[in-house]
Structures are given as C-alpha cells and as structure tokens.
Amino acid sequence: MGPKLLILFVIGDILGTGIYATTGKVAGKAGGALWLPFLIGFIVALLTAASYVELVGKYPKAAGAALYTQKAFKVPFLTFIVAFMVMCSGLSSASAAARAFSGDYFQEFTDAVPATLIAILFILALAALNLRGVSESVKTNVVLTIVELTGLAIILAIGAWAVLSGGGEPSRLTDLESSGTGYALVTSMLGATALGFFAFVGFEDSVNMAEETKDPVRTFPRAIFIGVAVTGTIYVLVALVSSLLVDHRTLERSSGPLLEVVKAGGVGFPPELFALIALFAVTNSALINIMMASRLCYGMANERILPKVMGRVLPGRRTPVVGIVFVSALAIGLVTTGEIEGLGDTTAFLLLCVFAIVNIAVLVLRRDPVGHAHFRTPTALPVLGAITALVLASPLADRDAEVYIRAGVLIAIGIGLWVVNRAVLRARGEDTA
C-alpha cells in the first residue's frame, strides 16, 4: 500500500456513522454551536494521532494499541483488556450504525418493519458478508467509501448554496444549549465533545496496516495527519451547515439528522436518494468494524489469549467463523440495549480509555530506543492527549450511567473468557505466562 492509498484508507476508516448519525445528538447537548464539539474533538484526535504516529514509526507491526501496551507495561492482563476494549469499541460502533440504518434514513422508504428487527437483520447481513471473505468485504468497502464521501459533498454543496442565496440562520451558530453557566456549561460541552469524538474514531485502526504499507516509518505520519485533518475539516463544515439550516431541536429528534439538512436546503435534492446514500455510509462503518472485531478475536485466540475454539476458520473460505459468530452475537445484544447516542457514547468511552493508555505508553517507551530514525511527537502532546482522553472518559462528560454499565458488562465478558482460557491451559499443563 502506497502513501496515496493509505491516506484514502485512513479517511475511509474515519468517515461514516459518526457524522451521519450523531450530529443531531451532539446538537442536543451543544445547541446551535454544535460545530464546537467537533472542532474540540478534532484537536483531541490530533493529540492521540501524534502518539500513534510515533509508535507505529518506532514499531511498524500490525498490532496497534495492544502491542504498545505490552511493550510499555509488560502486563499481559492489561494488554488483553486493551485489545478486548478495542474489539468491543468496534462492536458498539457497528451497533450504533445498525441503529442509524434502521432509523429515519430507512424509514424514508418504509416504517412498516420494527426498527430493532431491521437493526438485527442488518448485523446478520454483515456477518454473512464477512463470512464470504476479506476480498468481498474490502471491495464492498471501497465502493461504500466513495458513496459516503459523495453524501457529505452534497451536504456541503447545499450549505454553500444556502449561504450564497442568503438562506439559513447564522445566529444559531453561537447558541449554546445549556441555560446554565460555569460547571453546567462545561459538563454539557464535555458531553457533546465526547459524543462528537465518536465521529473521529477509526484512524487508530490504520496502524494495523503497518506491515502492508511501503516504508511505513515515512508514510504513516503524513497519511494519519492528512487523514485526520481532512475528516476534521469536513466534520466541522458539515456541523456548521447543519446548524445554519436546521434548528438544533429538530436535529436532536432525528436519527437521520443530515436528511433534515437536505430537506431544509431548498435545492430540491431528492430526500430518498440522500437517505439511500446515508444507508450505504453507515453500512460501510459497520462492515469495517465487524471485520476488525472478528479478526482481532481470531488473532487473540491464535495467541492463546482467548479460548482456542474462537480461532476456528470456515473450511474453504478460511474466514474466522467462530469469531464472526461471537462478535455478531455481541453486536446484536448491544443493538437491543441502546439507541444511537448511548451506543456511540459507549464506543467513544472505550476508545478514550485506550487512547489514554496509548498516550502514556508513548512516554514510557521513550526509554526503549530503536535503531532507526522515526517521527517523535513533542512531549507536551501525549501529556495533553492523556489528560483530555481521561477527562472526556470521566463522569464530567455528562454521560448516562447506562454507558458505563454497558462498557462494564462487555469488559466483564472479556475477563470471563480470559479466566476460562487460563483455567483450560492450566488443566492441560500449558504455559499461561
């Protein structure tokens, strides 16, 4: 993979469900100034991206956060928890995408089928595609990435038309939802930023392509920074357009907020066509995350971190059938426990915890020099990255308790599998170190 393709991969990995589905929920917390949480989220993402760039240049291996955690702290259980949290973040993200798919975008065509049933069938369809093989999944991903970029370009074009024609309401852009000041305003904006951060997740997955990239030490810094910068700019512009054209209360009530923007744009663009584009966009995000989670499950089974049976592959296709079934079952369970906002916030919470550890790891690993030159981020950036990640993961971020409960249950499942696997290995007399 060359530098141009890697940049496209990073952009495609980040774009998707977050902006298409959670813009309205961010507006519910931030009001008309919903562009501000996306701007802050962009800055926070850049801080952690800088740490990932240093680490992938230092250790150009396909293991990501789990590899960096193990090298920095050398605690296998912590390494497992980080890997499992990354896997679960993919599942909660896919579940949020399933909820977005079954919401207003799908209901633009019909509301005769219960939304939860549609979301479950959506997960099952992705599992079936995943079982077909990586080639089919990757080819589908390329097509869907182009479609989702087209959808966001349409939103920006509608916004440009509105500005040039004197439409929209610029005064909304500075309206904050919180009627309080001080602490109430801060927690409201932190909550909006934490939820908006969900739109930026994905760049961390790209480090798993290190071994598939030409000269990753030189290629990755440019690819990740450009990818995050491009998507961050698009997100802030889309948020500005959304607030300019639609009242934040209308956005909040919709599970398809960008569809409301299209309808309010006054350009006569067919809502059904945009709804179809949005359905493809959220499908792309879910597909990528289901693929990532199932392969991570397979990898942990092969490393004897999870029970060996979870590494079993489908004869002929060589796809990790047990891993796919396991992660799909968890995703279906998540779909039945929450809506877009809660599932998106669960994804953000899990990854913010992982990002805090990665930012600390980059500082610890400064004591482990390597024999080649690589990008080195200024020390202040990982320090700020760790602090901001921990703050956004904390209760200060005005997060519902159900998010912590859901994340806790997922981690408990992982710990249970860890304990069972160690017991089996001990019974066989195999090394469990």
Image (cartoon, rainbow, N blue to C red):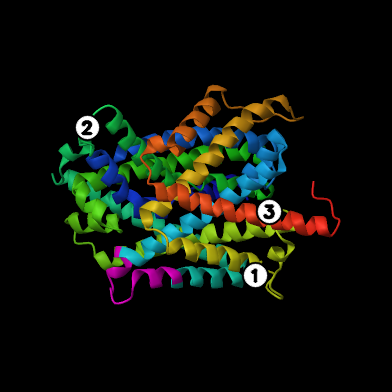
Label 2 sits on residue: 180
Position in image of residue 33 (x %, y %): 25, 38
Badge 3, how many Cα within 10 Å: few under 14, some, many 20+? some
Which is nearer the N-term, disc 3 or disc 2? 2
Instruction: Give the number of the disc on residue 418.
Output: 3
- Tag 3, which secondary structure? helix
Residue 139 at least partly seen: no
Amino acid type at circle 3 is Trp
Q: Nearer the viewer, residue 234 or 258?
A: 258
Q: Are marks 3 and 2 in contact (CB under 8 Å)?
A: no
The residue wearing badge 1 is 321
Segment colored magenta: 104-120
> Which percent across, then down, holds residue 134?
61, 65
Residue 288 left/right relative to 303:
left
Inspect this view and state whether residue 292 appears.
yes
Q: Vertical placement of 322 versus 361: above or below?
A: below
Question: Which residue does the image show at 48% across and 35% down from the upper left?
Answer: 389
Who comes first in sequence, dot 1 or dot 3?
A: 1
Q: The residue under label 1 is which amino acid type?
A: Val
Tag 1 near tag 3, CB within 8 Å: no
